[in-house]
Image (spheres, helix red, strand yellow):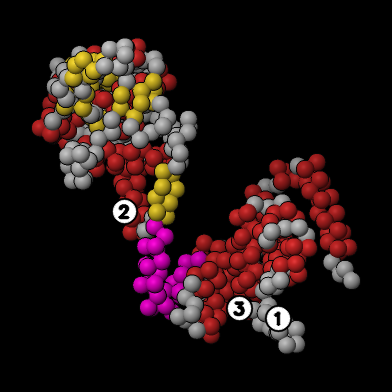
C-alpha cells in the first residue's frame, strides 16, 4: 500500500505553484532585507524537513540492497550496479551528494532486528530526533556524526551518544551558553572537540592513516594548464597556508590624494589587483618554488641544483612568435614565458645547423649573483610595482633591458618584481625604466590620466633619506 505518493504529489504541486507565483510576482525582489532573511530561513527549514525524508528513503534503499544475494537486491531489481547509481538515476543528484545521503543515513537510520523485524535505536538517537524535528539537515548530521564516528571502536557507543547529545543541544539552541542554534560549521567544531577529548589515544592511529593517504600528483598537461591533486599532511598544509597568508595578507594603506614624491609630483595610487584568491595562491606557490629551487638546499640532479630547462629558437625569442619547450612538460610554452624564465635564470646559447647537428655550445651566463641581489634588495626594498607588498626575499630580479637584447647583468639594469608582476608585466601595463641607477615606473592607462615616470622604493633606508631631505 502506497502511503506517500499521493501526499508527496500534492505537496510538490503546491510548492511548484508557490515557485511560479514567486517568480511572476517577484516576491523575493520586492521583499525588504528583514523579510528576505525570514523567507530564506523558512525555505531552509523546509529543505531540512525534505532532507529528513530523503535520508530515511536512502537508508531504506541501502537496507534493501545489503543482502548477500545480488539478484535479491533492490539495486539489481531496478537495473543499477549500486545504491549510488540508483540515487543518481532517480533523484538526478551528483555522485558526491548521493554519497553524503548514504553516510547520513548510515548514522541515523534505525536498526532492524533480525529476529523480530522491529525497529531498534539508531547509532545516534539524538541526532535522528533532531533530523525528524527539522533542526538539522544532511550538513548538520554529517557535522555531528562524522568526527564522533572516527573514534569507534576506541570510544564506547555510550560516550559517543553522550557527546552527540551535547552537540545536538547546540544545534537546537539549547546549549549551556545559551547561544542561538549553531550552523553546520560550528557543529563540526563542537563535534571535533568532543572527538579529541574522548579519544586521547586516537592521535597515533589518525596520524598513521594520514601518512598512508598523503599524496601529491601532477596530472597530464593540457592547453589550459596542468591539474594537480592530492592529500597533504596537516602540518604540510599548515605550512603551505602560512606561506599563502604571508604572501596574500593585504597591506593596510591610507591613500592620501595630496601625497607628493621627492620631486613634488603626486604619488600614484596602488595598482589594481583583480586576481581571485585561488589565482593568488597559485602565484604564491610559484614564488615559493622559485625560492626553494634557488636556495641551494635541495638535492641535486646530475650534480646540479634542480633546474627548469626551457629551449627556444633565438629567432622566435627575438620576434615573440613561435613556442618554447620545457623539460617534463608536454605542452608548449609561449615566448613570454620563456623570456620570464630566462630573465631570472641561466642562459646557455647552443648553435645548431638545420639538420640538428650541434656546432657550438656557449658557456652558461648566470644572471645576478647573490651580491647583486642583496644590493638591489637594499635599493628597492621589495616589488617595485606601487601597492605590492611582496618582500625582497620573495621577489625575482627583472632585466629592465632584456638580457636577450643585450641588457647587462648589472645592478643598474635589475629591479625586484614579485612572481606575478614579473610574469605578467607586459599584460598589466606597468612600464619600468632605470634613471641613473634607480628604477622608475609609469602607470598603465587604466590607472589614471597622469602618465609620469616616478621613482619607486620600499626600502626603509631610502625612505628615511627621502624624509630627511624634505
* Residue 23 place in picture, x, y as percent: 77, 43
Query: Is residue 415 depicted above or below 307 in this figure?
Result: above
Mark carried by residue 112? 1
**For the point 61% across and 72% down, which residue is it?**
107
Q: In screen coordinates, is 446 left or right of 455?
A: right
Where's the C terminus, which quadrant?
Answer: top left
Query: Height in image: 249 above or below 41?
Result: above
- Position of the N terminus, as image quadrant, is bottom right
Q: Secondary structure at mark 1?
A: loop
Name the one closer to the observer, 202 or 348. 348
The image quadrant of residue 235 is bottom left
Residue 434: mark? none
Which percent across, then down, holds residue 58?
70, 65
- Read off the magenta span: 187-214
Q: Which residue is mark 3?
A: 123
Within-10-Å neighbours for mark 1: few <14, some 14–19, many 20+: some
Q: Which residue is mark 2?
A: 239
Res. 308 visible in picture: yes
Answer left or right for 238 relative to 113: left
Q: Residue at x 35, y 51 (%)?
A: 241
Q: Is residue 145 left or right of residue 443?
A: right
At x 39% / y 26%, what residue is drawn?
333
Q: Earlier in the sequence, mark 3 or mark 1?
A: 1
Query: For the residues marked 3 and 1, what is the alpha-carbon distance in whole angstroms?
Result: 12 Å
Amino acid at each position: 500500500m502506497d502511503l506517500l505518493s499521493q501526499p508527496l504529489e500534492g505537496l510538490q504541486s503546491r510548492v511548484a505553484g508557490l515557485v511560479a507565483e514567486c517568480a511572476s510576482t517577484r516576491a523575493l525582489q520586492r521583499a525588504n532585507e528583514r523579510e528576505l532573511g525570514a523567507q530564506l530561513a523558512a525555505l531552509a527549514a523546509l529543505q531540512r524537513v525534505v532532507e529528513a525524508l530523503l535520508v530515511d528513503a536512502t537508508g531504506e534503499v541501502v537496507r534493501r540492497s545489503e543482502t548477500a544475494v545480488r539478484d535479491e537486491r533492490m539495486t539489481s531489481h531496478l537495473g543499477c550496479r549500486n545504491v549510488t547509481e540508483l540515487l543518481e538515476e532517480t533523484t538526478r543528484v551528483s555522485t558526491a551528494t548521493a554519497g553524503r545521503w548514504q553516510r547520513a543515513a548510515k548514522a541515523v537510520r534505525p536498526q532492524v532486528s533480525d529476529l523480530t523485524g522491529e525497529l531498534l535505536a539508531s547509532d545516534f538517537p539524538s541526532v535522528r530526533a533532531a533530523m525528524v524535528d527539522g533542526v538539522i539537515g544532511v550538513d548538520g548530521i554529517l557535522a555531528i556524526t562524522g568526527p564522533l564516528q572516527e573514534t569507534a571502536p576506541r570510544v564506547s557507543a555510550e560516550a559517543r551518544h553522550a557527546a552527540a547529545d551535547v552537540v545536538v543541544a547546540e544545534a537546537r539552541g539549547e546549549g549551556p551558553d545559551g547561544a542561538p542554534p549553531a550552523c553546520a560549521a560550528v557543529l563540526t567544531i563542537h563535534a571535533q572537540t568532543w572527538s579529541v577529548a574522548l579519544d586521547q589515544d586516537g592521535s597515533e592511529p589518525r596520524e598513521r592513516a594520514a601518512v598512508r593517504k598523503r599524496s601529491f600528483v601532477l596530472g597530464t598537461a593540457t592547453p589550459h594548464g596542468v591539474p594537480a591533486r592530492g592529500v597533504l599532511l596537516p602540518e604540510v598544509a599548515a605550512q603551505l597556508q602560512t606561506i599563502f597568508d604571508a604572501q596574500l595578507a593585504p597591506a593596510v594603506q591610507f591613500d592620501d590624494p595630496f601625497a607628493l614624491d621627492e620631486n613634488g609630483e603626486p604619488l600614484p595610487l596602488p595598482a589594481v589587483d583583480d586576481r581571485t584568491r585561488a589565482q593568488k595562491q597559485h602565484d604564491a606557490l610559484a614564488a615559493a618554488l622559485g625560492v626553494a629551487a634557488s636556495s641551494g638546499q635541495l638535492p641535486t640532479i646530475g650534480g646540479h641544483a634542480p633546474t627548469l630547462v626551457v629551449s627556444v629558437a633565438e629567432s622566435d625569442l627575438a620576434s615573440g612568435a613561435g613556442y618554447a619547450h620545457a623539460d617534463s612538460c608536454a605542452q608548449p610554452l609561449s615566448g613570454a614565458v620563456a623570456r620570464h624564465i630566462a630573465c631570472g635564470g641561466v642562459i646557455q646559447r647552443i648553435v645548431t645547423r638545420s639538420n640538428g647537428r650541434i656546432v657550438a655550445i656557449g658557456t652558461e651566463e648566470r644572471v645576478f649573483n647573490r651580491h647583486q641581489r642583496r644590493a638591489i634588495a637594499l635599493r628597492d626594498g621589495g616589488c617595485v610595482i606601487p601597492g605590492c607588498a611582496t618582500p625582497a626575499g620573495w621577489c625575482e630580479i627583472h632585466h629592465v633591458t632584456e638580457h636577450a637584447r643585450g641588457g647587462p647583468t648589472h645592478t643598474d639594469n635589475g629591479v625586484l618584481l614579485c612572481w606575478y608582476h614579473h610574469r605578467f608585466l607586459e599584460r598589466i601595463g606597468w612600464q619600468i625604466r632605470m634613471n641613473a641607477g634607480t628604477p622608475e615606473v609609469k602607470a598603465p592607462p587604466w590607472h589614471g590620466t597622469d602618465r609620469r615616470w616616478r621613482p619607486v622604493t620600499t626600502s626603509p633606508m631610502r625612505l628615511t633619506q627621502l624624509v630627511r631631505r624634505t
